[in-house]
Amino acid sequence: MLNTVLSALAWFFAALTFALSITVPNGYNIGTTFIFLLSLIFLLKPKWSVLNKDDKLLFFGFAFYAVAMFGFVYLDGWHTRELDRPSRFILVLPVLLLLLKSAGREKWLWFGTIIGAIGAFSLAVYERKVLGYGRAHGSEHPIMFGNTGMLLGLMSFVSATYFYANKRRIWMMLAVLGGLCGIGASVLSASRGGWVALPLIGFFLLWQSRFLLGKKLVWGVCITSMLLVTAAVVVPQTGIKDRIGQAINDVVRYDKGVDKDSSVGLRFEMWKAALIMFEESPLVGVGEYGSVAVKERLIGEGTVSEKVLTHSHAHNEFINALGLTGIIGFAFLIAVYLIPLRLFLKKMRQYPDNWNIRSFAMAGALVPMCYMDFGLSQVMFSHNIGVMMYVFSIVYFWAAVRWAERKELSK
């Protein structure tokens, strides 16, 4: 009985992570804190026998990334506060052990993502329409709020395939609503970087679901999606058209040398500074604290805008890694994306028609895919919510895949 209760609590806290992630202040910390505390039981006597070859690849992939980042903190002057975010890649590991031993209630994750997406949109509407904010943000930076909302929305769309395959129509409709709400939260945050993910990953999800949905439904989704996107761009209240026009104008003005301090122009300046840092220290980078002196020198030389100094990162995950941690840090970053992506895609290929398993694998795969897209205009791992939503989402969905697989194999 105790094991049953603990298992239920573990999956409840996992679902709670998504449900509260950006709807309440630091909501992502609530579920993750409780499930981590619950997982401490497994640190007393780790159940290593629950790990198969793929589990170990994910487990040690996260562990090695954390150790590598600790090493870069040491090289950068050992500012211990910088150990906080990479430590999450270690702290999530007992949670993986816990969930692999907790009788699967994996479908609860879908309820969490749907509630989280609808809650995020509701908060975004309140902030924009009632409070009059220019950008919805909750308790986070607008970019992080918008990107997380987009992630929740895309997860909700994946959950729709699970409910559709299991003929649960009401939850399927709620899942579609959740998907639209997650995207709506991103739109109301006016975070343009996350919008790039929508057509690319949307096409991936639709293509992977084409045999489940059938030709007519796929075409229906495509046409409906195009109509919704067109309407969203045309309707001025969404702000999409203005934000896109502003970005184009920023690029033109930067190219002419008129304005280097616009939103886009300043990003170009930060990228330029980071690439110069990479040229000066290609192996291990200059470090976050070491970058300050380099930026000051570049500003003194007139190479980059002085406003570059007001930002601790380059607003691009990949270029930032090259500048601060060199090619070694960049390689670890790519690995921490590709290892879980490869594992989830492997499960999708292994179960092409079993949507009780495939849907969880698809949701897991879109996490690194989204983060690679978000990383083009934001350093997600420099924010606590960015790290937490990455590592815990992957662990949750990987454990869900493994439990769904066990259930199918036991039939």
Image (cartoon, rainbow, N blue to C red):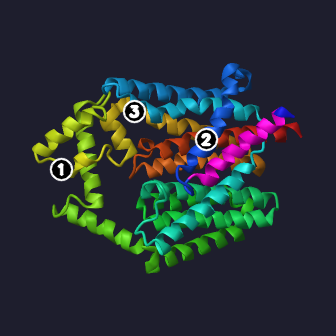
Question: Residue at image x 72%, y 22%?
Answer: 47
The spot of residue 239 in percent (x, y) is 42, 73
Q: Is residue 96 visible?
A: no
- Judging by the rendered image, the residue that carries numbered circle 1 is 306
Q: Tag 2's secondary structure?
A: helix
Q: Quadrant of the N terminus?
A: top right
Estimate how packed mark 1 is, as few (under 14), some (14 to 19) or many (20 or more) residues with alpha carbons within 10 Å: some
Q: Nearer the viewer, residue 145 or 316?
A: 145
Q: Mark 1 or mark 2: name the one nearer the start of the chain.
A: 2
What residue span does the magenta drawing correspond to?
3-21
Q: CA distance from mark 3 to mark 2?
A: 20 Å
The spot of residue 111 in percent (x, y) is 71, 55
Q: CA distance from mark 3 to mark 1?
A: 25 Å
Picture disc at residue 99: none
The question of residue 7 being in magenta is answered with: yes
Residue lying at the far left of the rendered structure: 301
The spot of residue 136 in percent (x, y) is 46, 64
Q: Are marks 3 and 1 in contact (CB under 8 Å)?
A: no
Q: Which amino acid, by three-letter code, is at mark 3?
A: Glu
Name the side, left or right, on which 374 lies relative to 252: right
Q: Is residue 167 visible?
A: yes
Q: CA distance from mark 1 to mark 2?
A: 39 Å
- Judging by the rendered image, the residue that carries numbered circle 2 is 32
Q: Mark 3 or mark 2: name the one nearer the start of the chain.
A: 2
Q: Tag 3's secondary structure?
A: helix
Q: Which amino acid, by three-letter code, is at mark 2?
A: Thr
Q: Which amino acid, by three-letter code, is at mark 1?
A: Glu
The question of residue 146 being in magenta is answered with: no
Estimate how packed mark 2 is, as few (under 14), some (14 to 19) or many (20 or more) residues with alpha carbons within 10 Å: many
Picture disc at residue 82: 3
